[in-house]
Image: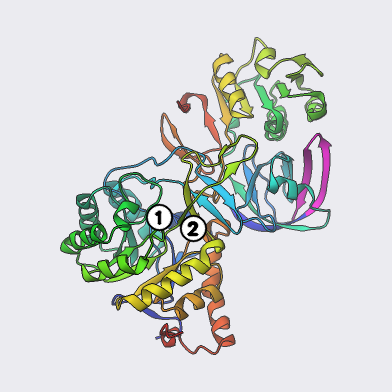
Amino acid sequence: MKQQILRVTENIRIAENVYKMVLEDPELEEQKPGQFINIRINGLYLRRPISVCESDPGNVVIIYKVVGKGTEQLSRIRKREYLDVLTGLGNGYDLSKAGDHPLLLGGGVGVPPLIKLARMLRDAGKEVQAVLGFNTKAEVFGEGAFQEMDCKTTVTTVDGSYGVKGFVTDALPEDYSYFYTCGPEPMLRAVYKATCTSGQFSFEERMGCGFGACMGCSCKTITGYKRICREGPVLEKEEILWDD
Amino acid sequence: MGRLTVNLCGIELDNPVIPASGTFGFGYEFAQWYDINCLGTFSFKGTTREPRFGNPTPRIAECPAGMINAVGLQNPGVEKVISEELPKLKEVFHKKVMANVSGFSVEDYAYSCEKLDAEEQVGWLEVNVSCPNVHGGGMSFGTDPKAAAEVTRAVKRVATKPVIMKLSPNVTDITEIAKACEDAGADGISLINTLQGMRINLKTRKPVIKNVMGGVSGPAVFPIALRMVWQVCRAVKIPVIGMGGIASAEDALEMMMAGATAVEVGAANLADPYASKKIIEDLPAAMDQYRIQSLGELKGDC
């Protein structure tokens, strides 16, 4: 965990309401897939937590959707501006359990954290498959990144305007060794039910601090209370307790 | 005595800055950001007799110049705080800590306070009769002078350390509650806890916070907090800790000019993990600017 002032070197629209931002600083450490950064935005009180899409030493890429005031303002940040960012937050995915042909399931802006994950799994010699779900064609992004990595990639859209019509769970391959997923909670619940192996889920929650101090993002698990920002955002399938 | 030194109920603090309960965990989360021994002290996470998960999520909402929380006193319970949290804290914090206690009955308060009072690390007991986020406890003791006095008396019976009653601003006349606590033997008063508020999500037409209401904190509440601290300082003779939206050394000085002996910093720690440290570091220059030799000279006679 570090507080850093990062330079914005790119902030472009890549799909409907979806933006890609690149942040740089020579002292920035490589962020793990599944970790997030917490960005201070002028005029807003709480920082906005955004998951890491790609990262090397010195830079981090985020892909975010404009869903409210904070992300709307983030989308208007220009190149060469500086942002106050807390980096290295959250646990990130555990790659050691992937097996030899893991499956990645992403929904909407749940896709970005899977991009770096896919790269690292592929570099470790895994045969990676991906199913990416969106509402409609205009919102689709990231397919190319997975294809470039030679991942067998399927895109689904709810309205059928692109790829397979339906949800990611309508396009699950029959054979996979393990899975990693990130997306909206209804999707995560569906993935929980539809998958036949163990896997890891990345959760989203409204946060106060993002570093474990305020207990704003706690959840109950089989193994006790966890903070999404600290012991999460990635939880193992076997420890998840759904509300209600 | 340094120029930042203050005396809080008989214990000297290197400076008057105290991170507020609920925004600083049990300290060690912040020890990863900086050496927390620079603090005057801090008030640890509100502790209850039994372990609590707290309220369902979402527990947090943004508001202009601040935030709303409805955490609901998540804590591992007083036994585990003593057996697990305090030993971890001891490794990173070598000063007396303020134990923040909440409860659902007078007996609860006395039970937890007696246990924590016996801990060598604990310097003060801060008794929270003002949590807005739990039903049948917390704030219900702090909105009635008789109930606040009853809790004060029960805690004073078991405590050997200074007892500071933390008050709710969600009352018609906060001075009445403060006086009732003083008359019942309280050694100090801290205020304000959060103000009740809410937000609605325009898209879903539902409250942002699952519990509907939460407590508003941050700079938005600072003028209200300052006013209440000023009023209470005029109503009681015991020391007062001022809090509510403090975000800078200047805010801290205003609170002390209103009569506060020390200040607590809350929400600011969440927006910026270094907030309390920066306030301490900025105090000397701010004092120079306003020709304040030492904090002891601020007597609240504004």
Q: Is residue B64 above or below residue A235?
A: below
Where is residue B122? Give x, y as percent: 29, 63
Label 2 secondary element: helix
Q: x%, y% of residue B276?
A: 51, 66
Residue A14 drawn above or below residue B73: above
- Work out whether residue A214 can be spotted: no
Q: Chain of mark 2?
A: B
Q: Amino acid at mark 2?
A: Phe
Amino acid bearing label 1: Phe
Q: Quadrant of residue A199?
A: top right
The answer as to whether the residues below labels 2 and 1 share one chain is yes
Q: Check disc 1 and report the residue beneath it.
A: B26
Q: Is residue B123 magenta?
A: no
From the top left corner, tell me how far across and down residue B289 is, in percent.
59, 86
Judge from the rendering whether residue A214 lies leftward or rightward of residue A6; answer left or right.
Answer: left
Label 2 packing within 10 angstroms: few (<14), some (14-19), many (20+): many
Q: CA distance from mark 2 to mark 1?
A: 9 Å
Q: Main secondary structure of the magenta part?
A: strand
Residue B148 as seen in the image, left or right of residue B234: left
> Quick one: label 1, few (<14), some, or many (20+) residues within 10 Å?
many
Q: Is residue A133 above or below residue B280?
A: above
Q: Nearer the viewer, residue A207 or B221?
A: B221
Residue bearing the label numbered 2: B30
Whether residue A2 sits left or right of residue B130 in the image: it is right
Magenta range is: A8-25
Of all chains, the one bearing label 1 is: B
**Callout 1: helix, strand or loop?**
loop
| x 27%, y 47%: residue | B104
